[in-house]
Image (cartoon, grey):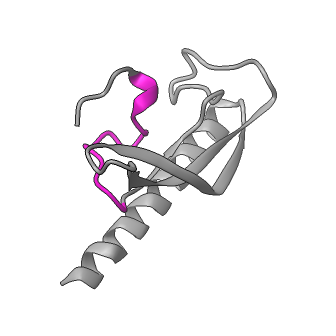
Amino acid sequence: MIYRSEHDQGKMKVVPYAGMYDFDGGCAPSEDLSRGGTGQSFTLGIFIWVTAAKGKRLKRGNVIKRFRGYRTKQSVIETYATARKFCEHKNNCKTEAKR
């Protein structure tokens, strides 16, 4: 999959596939707090990659769950870790079910 920009990919840092759980936050701070919005809180949305209508590329599905965090270093780290763990668990469950 070729990404057009940073906003075309999720936060799982792997090449997505149809049915893969991933997360992103448009106004969320980066994990090291070097960039991001200015509000007091933020959310990370969990979504599933789905095949686009013509079947040649992937697109993000609807957000199915949100994790809320606050703009403190500890909260940002915990919120990202929680979202990453949730996605990894869901993706591993799908892999196990296919076997």
Q: Tell me the residue at 30%/48% (across/down).
A: 16
Q: Tell me the residue at 66%/27% (across/down).
A: 27
> Residue 59, how many percent across, how many down?
42, 44
> Residue 96, how many percent across, how many down?
26, 80
- In magenta, the rendered stretch is 6-19
In reply to whether residue 50 is colored magenta, the answer given is no
- Left or right of 12? Residue 63 is right
> Residue 25, how many percent across, how many down?
59, 36
- Left or right of 81? Residue 66 is right
- Left or right of 10? Residue 99 is left
Q: Quadrant of residue 21?
A: bottom left
- Residue extending farthest to the front is 54
Q: Tell me the residue at 24%/30% (across/down).
A: 2
- Left or right of 85? Residue 27 is right
In reply to whether residue 18 is colored magenta, the answer given is yes
Q: Tell me the residue at 50%/46% (across/down).
A: 23
Q: Is residue 88 above or below residue 97?
A: above
Quadrant in which the N terminus is drawn = top left
